[in-house]
Amino acid sequence: MEAIASAAPAKDASIGRRVALLMRNSKGFPIPLAVAMVAPLLIGLAVAFVQPVGQLLATSLWHPDFTLVEYQRIGATPLYFRIIARTFLLATTVTVAALLLGYPVALFLARLSGWRLTVATACIMLPLWTSVLVRSYSWIVILQRNGLLNTFLQWLGVINAPLPLLYNELAVVVAMTHVLLPYMILPIWAALRAMPRDLPLAAESLGANGPRVFWHVVLPLSMPGVASGTLMVFILALGFYVTPALVGGPRTLMLATLIGQQTIELLNWPFAGALAAVLLVTTLVLVAAFNRFLGLDKKAAS
Amino acid sequence: MTPCSGVQQPRNLSRRFARALWTGLCGAVFLFLLLPTVVVIPASFSAAKYFSFPPATWSVRWYVAYFHDEDWLAATSFSLEIALLSTVVALVLGVLVSLALVRSELPGKAAIRAIVLAPMIVPHIVIAVAMYLVYMRWDLVGTLPGLVLAHTVVCVPLVVINLSTGLQKMDPSLEMAAASMGADRIAAFRWVTLPLLAPSLATAAAFSFITSLDEAVISYFLSGSQGKTLTRKMFEDIDFDLSPIIAVASTLIIVVSVALMGSIELLRARNARLAAREA
């Protein structure tokens, strides 16, 4: 009897405890605990990531006194200027090629269903899951002297001797377009899927024909996907290292391969830091501009 | 089903022609995506001493060579070790950060998110060169801790993105229900949050593992003459000679990636089906 009597207040206390827990949980983790939860990663990133990048950029500006000589060197040397111009040109070419090839495919995907959709999705995802290094190597397999394409063309009788297909700018553009194409297709496809299905139908019922529906309804509604796909492909292309290094050869240096060469072969850290700063700042400005653009878009929509 | 059904009923010849052209173009693009991805697989079964495609005769001699070559085996196991450890570290740190970002009123969340996701935006060549510069001084180049540290940095954003999305989709009242029944925070996490988060965790783990295994730029710069990752070894050999053994390594990487990501995708499709049935 005594045990039951003494259990009653204990039960009340446990209800109080539960209520307290409930109140606390509805606000989530208390702030000191949350700080402790983010601290290990933030400290790790500060030491292993932020600090190295900061040091690399600092070597380009201080050795040991503040100087802009490395940056002046980039602007004043036609060779480096040409490499940067080539990088932007190649990145633009790859982005345009990916958009031209990717948009029809995304539109095609948006209309598929059932097993056709499964097969088509696999065609897009399979390359995405495969290492960039492996896919760049594949292009060597295809384009080299006794590779797939030369063998095929000789078998057809189109050419008598193998063509030099590898180690030029065209090879870089083709291989990079292949590697980056899924990054263009996926956001456009997502935008098209998110589009309400009755909108094109409504336009049609109001008398618009196929091309007009596409031009005035489908295309504008898919623009957010086009914008993010374009940005993603462009910034990835700007900083691409593996594919130009393997498929491009020494004559088609790009910004990333030039940075690599300056560090590994020439040990010119200040200059590599300046080139890295150019690449990093360009990328960050593009991402910030894009965020602002999308943010304004969202505001306009609401 | 169709966003633009006007094209569905071909009314005249030119429209039918346009449709055929479009289907043909899409087919060509699919081939362009797929063919270069799988072309290394037949190349790996060549019997020739030097590279040629298509191989005149077939064999598994390059597979035998691969599994008898100490350098390739060392590089493979080094890469697998790095991938496994980076995945574990990224998962543990990523889970903690995702929970704090989604389930607390921590100030400065946007800034924390920006720093955590930054390695996805900063070009890998910049990360690679910067780490090379600093890790050299710390004697971390070519070591397991150095590469795990570097790969964790690039894997963590994937973990945080996957887990935050998973957590945001999850109903917080479930955790509160657990608390109302007397579960403390750790019990609620162990028995409610964690099982519900399992699909996101599996996806995050698979992404991390593949990212680390495939990563070529940072690995290239941070590998040493002793500690060499698989991608660095492939990179060097592609530049040096084009023996079909690289096709073997490529095929193995493709098999691992596709098996892992494919099973995650199947799991996700199964979950979606189950959820649809419940609804």
Image: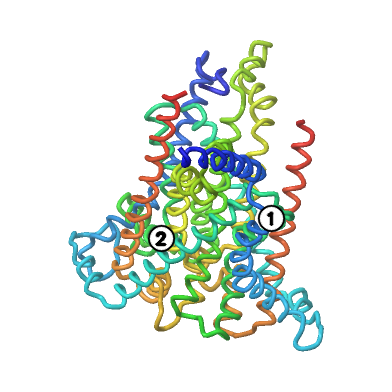
How packed mark 2 is, by other alpha carbons closer than 10 Å (few <14, some 14-19, many 20 or more), is many
Q: Position of residue A257 (x, y in %)?
A: 57, 71
Chain identifier of the residue bearing label 1 in the image: A
Nearer to me, A126 or B139: B139
Q: How many marks?
A: 2
Residue B155 x %, y %: 52, 60
Image coords of residue A156 (percent x, y): 32, 49
Q: CA distance from mark 2 to mark 1?
A: 45 Å
Name above or below for residue A296 compared with residue A49: above
Dot 2 amino acid type: Val
**Vertical placement of B194 versus A105: above or below?**
below
Residue B262 image-quadrant placement: top left
| SS state under label 2 | helix
**What's the residue at 38%, 54% (across, down)?**
B257
Residue B140 horizontal side relative to residue A266, left or right: left
- Residue drawn at (45%, 33%), measured in percent from left and top? B24
Q: Depth check: give the residue in front, B98 or A109.
A: B98
Give the number of the disc on residue A31. 1
Q: Which residue is mark 2?
A: A134
Tell me if residue B219 can be seen.
Answer: yes
Depth check, front residue: A22 or B36:
A22
- How many C-alpha atoms fall within 10 Å of the one at disc 1: few (<14), some, or many (≥20)? some
Residue A103 appearing in the image: no
Q: Quadrant of residue A214?
A: top right
Quarter-of-image position of residue A41: bottom right
Whether marks 2 and 1 lie on the same chain: yes
Q: Does residue A263 sit above or below A49 in this rendering?
A: below
For disc 2, the chain is A
Which residue occupies the extreme bottom position in the image?
A: A64
Instruction: Specify the amino acid type for callout 1.
Output: Ile
